[in-house]
Image (cartoon, helix red, strand yellow):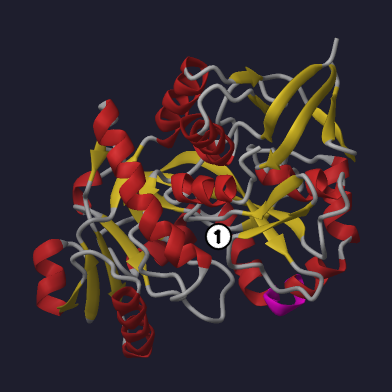
Amino acid sequence: MTDRYDVIVVGAGILGLATAWTLLGDRPGSRVAVVDKEHRVAAHQSSHNSGVIHAGVYYAPGSAKARLCRAGKSQLEEFCASRGIPVLHNGKVIVAVDEAELPGLAELARRAARNEVEGLRELDAADVRRLEPNVRALRGLHSPRTGVVDFRLVCRVLASEIRERGGELHLGRAVEAIEERPGEVVVGTARGELMAGRVVTCAGLQSDRVAAMTGDAGDERIVPFRGSWYVLRRPELVNGNVYPVPDPRLPFLGVHLTPRIDGSVWVGPNAVLSPAREGYRRGTVDVRDLADTLRFGGFWRLAGRYAASGARELVEDRSRHLYARAVQRYVPDVSAADLAAGPTGIRAQSVAADGSMVEDFSIGGSGRVLHVRNAPSPAATSSLAIARDLVDRLPDR
């Protein structure tokens, strides 16, 4: 007998769990199921991130990132406070270390003002030293309400409350097909078919492949980038998050220092092409994943655009000493001996056919199926707000 649901959510990361949780809160008694190929929740990006609760400094005003980060941050903090999940507001200092970075810092200040970042203030060199005595900078920005949390714990609490509200979690059940039929959607899995009135997919690293099941992938494809972190052996060197002014010539933010909820400090991450979407160890290769990347013209256009920075990332990925030099721009006292090998994550970066990286959240689909096709940082911070947006797109019945 085929199981039937009002809504099936594909993906048990923080976005999928938040969507199911929001649905069940809005519509008590609804039949909602979360389906995921992994045997645990938050198996990938939701548990392989820095844990930062972002305040919204970096995002283009008017973008979905800016809007949903601001709303999601307050919702997430309220959720955690009401459930006893520890949150530490250790703040963030964004530093300009040379004159060339000052225009970029000024632009971040303008963005932050338009994004209504709480408590943001501009710093001169002395102000930076008072907040971060070991950090070198000409000027900076301070976001005092930036915080950190254990997103894996948030996911576990969401999963528990989904079950309490009558929802179901089908873990270890890979989705192999999604077919829309008159009045329903059939979700084919390795353990049989599931039926639903609506389907929402939040598949992260597999989002393009899941969207392609319904012909809704568009011209975007996921290109996976592995990011490795170091753990700072002397966590006392920083008091809060220390972030750079983004270099417009580079595709990613660059090295930063992140104090974690457990008291450790992570340094990184770098960003190198990953030959496996879910391969967290250096050298892991998935033939299908690598072939999909190399067959995609958008990847080659992206690679050509950032060849020099990509080569530098590859070299630094193999050299602790070179990586320490990058950190020393901001914290001169850090040496290679201070950096211990840390965890690794894979970023699901959506890339368009023209080689441009899809910067904003991307949601699409047709008929009875809705796909989250791109959800990079700050998706975890924004998760409850993204979930609200997804649920509001679904009809009541």
Q: Is residue 175 above or below residue 148?
A: above
Q: Quadrant of residue 279?
A: top right
Nearer-the-camera pick, 340 or 118: 118
Nearer-the-camera pick, 129 or 106: 106
Amino acid type at circle 1 is Glu
Q: Is residue 203 above or below residue 377?
A: above
- Is most of the magenta stretch helix, strand or loop? helix
Q: Quadrant of residue 331?
A: bottom left
Q: Quadrant of the C terminus?
A: top right
Nearer-the-camera pick, 326 or 83: 83
Q: Residues within 10 Å of mark 1 (few under 14, many from 20)?
A: some
State the extent of the magenta-drawn residues as a range.
303-307
Q: Position of residue 314 (x, y in %)?
A: 63, 60
Q: Position of residue 306 (x, y in %)?
A: 67, 75
Residue at 79% across, 66% down:
299
336 displayed left or right of 84: right
Residue at 37% across, 84% down:
107
Q: Which residue is mark 1?
A: 316
Q: Is residue 288 above or below residue 348?
A: above
Q: Is residue 263 above or below residue 67?
A: above
Q: Quadrant of the N terminus?
A: top right
Q: Is residue 137 visible?
A: no
In the image, is residue 305 part of the stretch drawn in magenta?
Answer: yes
In the image, is residue 196 part of the stretch drawn in magenta?
Answer: no
Residue at 71% across, 48% down:
370
Q: Position of residue 353 (x, y in %)?
A: 81, 70
Q: Position of residue 382 (x, y in %)?
A: 45, 51
Q: Could you say whether the residue bearing mark 1 is in a helix, strand or loop?
A: helix
Residue at 32% across, 90% down:
99
